[in-house]
Image: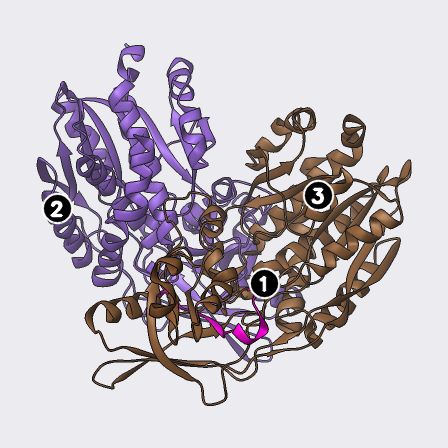
Chain colours: A brown, B purple
Amino acid sequence: MLRSIYDHNLTQSKSYEWLDHLSNEIGGRLSGSIQAERAVDYTTAELAKFVDRTEKQSVMVPKWTRGTPEFAYIQLGNLNTINVNVCALGGSIPTREEGIKAEIIEVKSLDELEVLGKEQIQGKFVFYNRPMDPKKIQTFEAYGGCVDQRYSGAREAGKYGAVGVIVRSMNLRLDDFPHTGSMSYGDLPIENYIPAAAISTNDAERLSTYLSLDSDIQFYLKQDCTVWGDVPSHNVFGEIKGSKYPDEIIVVGGHLDSWDLGDGSHDDGAGVVQSMQVLHTLKELGYRPQRTIRVVLFMNEENGLKGAKEYARQAALKKEQHIFALESDAGGFTPRGFSFDASDEQMALINSWRNLFKPYLIHYFEQGGSGADVGPLKEQGTVVAGLRPDSQRYFDFHHAANDTFEAVNKRELQLGAATMTSLIYLIDKYGTLKKTLD
Amino acid sequence: MLRSIYDHNLTQSKSYEWLDHLSNEIGGRLSGSIQAERAVDYTTAELAKFVDRTEKQSVMVPKWTRGTPEFAYIQLGNLNTINVNVCALGGSIPTREEGIKAEIIEVKSLDELEVLGKEQIQGKFVFYNRPMDPKKIQTFEAYGGCVDQRYSGAREAGKYGAVGVIVRSMNLRLDDFPHTGSMSYGDLPIENYIPAAAISTNDAERLSTYLSLDSDIQFYLKQDCTVWGDVPSHNVFGEIKGSKYPDEIIVVGGHLDSWDLGDGSHDDGAGVVQSMQVLHTLKELGYRPQRTIRVVLFMNEENGLKGAKEYARQAALKKEQHIFALESDAGGFTPRGFSFDASDEQMALINSWRNLFKPYLIHYFEQGGSGADVGPLKEQGTVVAGLRPDSQRYFDFHHAANDTFEAVNKRELQLGAATMTSLIYLIDKYGTLKKTLD
């Protein structure tokens, strides 16, 4: 059966064609945007062609818009200026219309702010410049070790009276793309909110060099993004009813929303179309699942996780029994395996399937870690998992303007979908995950 | 030690810088070209900066040049013409100066020629159009299942009086790049030699479609490549003498030559700089090898393997004891592991190291298969091995104009070099491969 699943995916898959539409016909799908709603309608219509039932589940999501392109430069002591590549972080407030020009102080961590104190920070930009650690083999670990600067940088600097924050892009490469992503002001009083922007890694290096050579640097930033109120949006489901245990639900999903700079092909168009492909492949191969298999395309993973939370809330309300949930949200690269939030006993079952995957060069089955959207289901005792593709290039594209259709390789995307389909098939067929948990 | 090797490679590697020079300053390095000799001199000079001894080993290599760009079109029954993307295969003769226009007959295999016979083939082009099999997970297997069309297509069609052969490019993607590669006329009488060219996969599909719709298709090909006599060239060595067993030689290598359409960054600039990096890393980490470790950069892998054969011949003459030889010639992509031409007993030792590699996501240790350049050493009882990077994208670039520096990811290249260094280190430290063989 696994052989058929891989063969089908590598020769008759719809995933690449769907991704082409999502990426090139629709484009970036930020929560609350017209593109996000077009993606809801498109995927619902596509799913309806081959599943038993589709549903659009209502959820309120935050709306934030970037406005006109950001503009920033470094002003040297001799008044020469050097333009730099920046983008507003998602959720940031704008600058005032004429922009902000101020001194800028470089730090490598949030902790340094306390040492510097208000007198050295007030009235200045704070420039967070701790790079991702290239020594981490798993690039998500390097990301995890840096992203506090982006997420909490403005909140912390706001406490010390900074006028704005400039954050080195979460990117292991040196290039010119600024990488956006979510940030939060947390419990900061609204009057202390300050604009936050990311700067490309090349420009972060440049800025740091100038700061080391010239004691009279000023930084200018202008951005006119807008934080709106919450707006209605949707998660999308498509399911095939189980023939034997229809009440046992297996979820496979990704997130429909994306950032707005690129078209979100890796993050997470790939996961969306791979999840749809799981059901499409099983259907095309004539496999009738024992359990209900549900594709869930979550809204608002990027800046709120509202879709995932609402999905889990409704599942609990309806007392739905979710035995397993798999997410693909790490890019459309060559699949290496899965990580599981599962008990030792459950891992023993899962590990017994390892050899089935070896011919497909899938070797990685590790305990710990799944995905943001399936996370909220953990509280209900669901075993959750994440597809683990090769991660080396992921942060070259993540949340940046180069996360486009061309960056996704068709075969790699297909192999990911085949690997997901194989796991979902095994869980449907042999899975006693819920029972071992009881 | 492995941790230090990976850390060093991911932060202080020279490999990417060397590749930049080979690719962008020197460019495509076809055997017998001025670029190939510049690459000999450059790598010798770079190696001399950190090894105990360098050597340029003389070897005669075939010289073939492409001449002015090839030109080809499909002429429809209504006399409209459609230009198509072709390139001469390496070793092909030219067409006559005015080109060749003839009918064209499509086949999917060499065997079909016998069925068609002389009356259906004579005076026509033969169009070999069997695609690589997308169902193969290892793309090298798909390549192996197709490449007879390119290598032997002209020899076989020449027997039946064809005027030329057009071969579908060895590429799993549909795109516009024709992919060159070696071909041979074998024992065909010289008067039966016919020109051979590759056509892009998109154009192969197009041509096939036209042939199915229009019974009056003609094909035009013009190319002015030249087969020269053999010319002198070199393999390059750089070695660090073993402190304890200087007569036991461990080889690590790639091939210096490349095709001429791109700059040969994946094939095999990556293998060249990774091999150099192995010694550089060990040196920088202050590791003094017990055995002699020799980087060998082979000339003429692509169209003759003359460098590898000469290397093995000289090694036998000098009674050098080669205990192990590792080749990197499968692209600069994320490393997955190694394949070994080794006995079961030797594999047992090698497999005992598996767990050391797991933190670096290296899982693949398989028996069978190594690399073309280290192949001739097998006769001397040397255990030979090949680095196995992820192969999904390799044939998108292989032998085509898009095999350029930009197609290589710095981290992936570095991880490959670190993985090779780790294996060479283990073999030097614990390797008793030669002993188990005796």
Q: Is residue B8 above or below residue A199?
A: above
Q: Residues within 10 Å of mark 2 (few under 14, many from 20)?
A: many
* Dots 1, 3 in contact, CB < 8 A: no
Compute the Cα span from label 2 to label 1.
58 Å
Percent position of residue B316, x then y: 17, 23
Say which amino acid is labelled 1. Answer: Gly
Of the pair A157 and B438, the residue shown nearer to us: A157
Disc 3 element? helix
Q: Which residues are magenta?
A: A182-201
Q: Main secondary structure of the magenta part?
A: loop
Residue A373 or B325: which is nearer the viewer?
Answer: A373
Disc 2 secondary structure class:
helix
Q: Which mark is residue B44?
A: 2
The quadrant holding residue B330 is top left
Q: How many marks?
A: 3
Q: Chain of mark 1?
A: A
Residue B198 seen in render: yes
Q: Which mark is residue A421?
A: 3
Question: CA–CA distance between discs 3 and 2?
Answer: 50 Å
